[in-house]
Image (spheres, grey):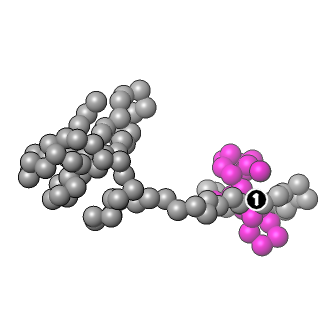
Amino acid sequence: MKFCPKCKSMMVPKDDKLVCRNCGYEMEKGEEVILKQNRRTEGIAVIDGKEVAVLPVIDVMCPECGNNKAYWWLRQLRSADESEVRFFRCTKCGKTWREYT
């Protein structure tokens, strides 16, 4: 990995040169440049509409319909030194609400 001598940004390959994305500085590629890209191939579960069957279920009362089952998941919404937020989605009506822990 090479960095721009002018602005210290990372240089990216373009044709037979390395170019700075920030200031446009160009330099010749050396033989030490190795490009490697790793991609995740496994699927990632996404909450979309009512497609939440992969989430765990907990006994909690829905404030909308009174159902006592909901899917739940955790998200870190604030800074890292604060606790995460627990989200719930009712298995019956689909209402989503949160609980700060």
In magenta, the rendered stretch is 1-21
| Above or below, comparing residue 88 to residue 25 in the picture | above
Q: Please, what is the three-letter code of the amino acid marked with disc 1?
A: Lys
Q: Secondary structure at mark 1?
A: loop
Provide residue 101's location: percent of width, then percent of height: 28, 30
Residue placed at 13% from the left, 50% from the top? 67
In the picture, measured across the screen, residue 80 lies left or right of residue 12, that is left
Residue placed at 68% from the left, 45% from the top? 8
Q: Which residue is label 1 attached to?
A: 36
Quadrant in the rendering for residue 33: bottom right
| Above or below, comparing residue 84 to residue 31 in the picture | above
Q: Is residue 59 magenta?
A: no
Q: Is residue 8 magenta?
A: yes
Q: Nearer the viewer, residue 68 or 84?
A: 68
Provide residue 1's location: percent of width, then percent of height: 77, 50
Taking the image as drawn, is residue 99 in sight?
A: yes
Residue most extreme to the bottom:
15
Q: Nearer the viewer, residue 10 or 60?
A: 60
Provide residue 97's location: percent of width, then percent of height: 20, 46
Residue placed at 40% from the left, 60% from the top? 46
Residue placed at 9% from the left, 48% from the top? 66
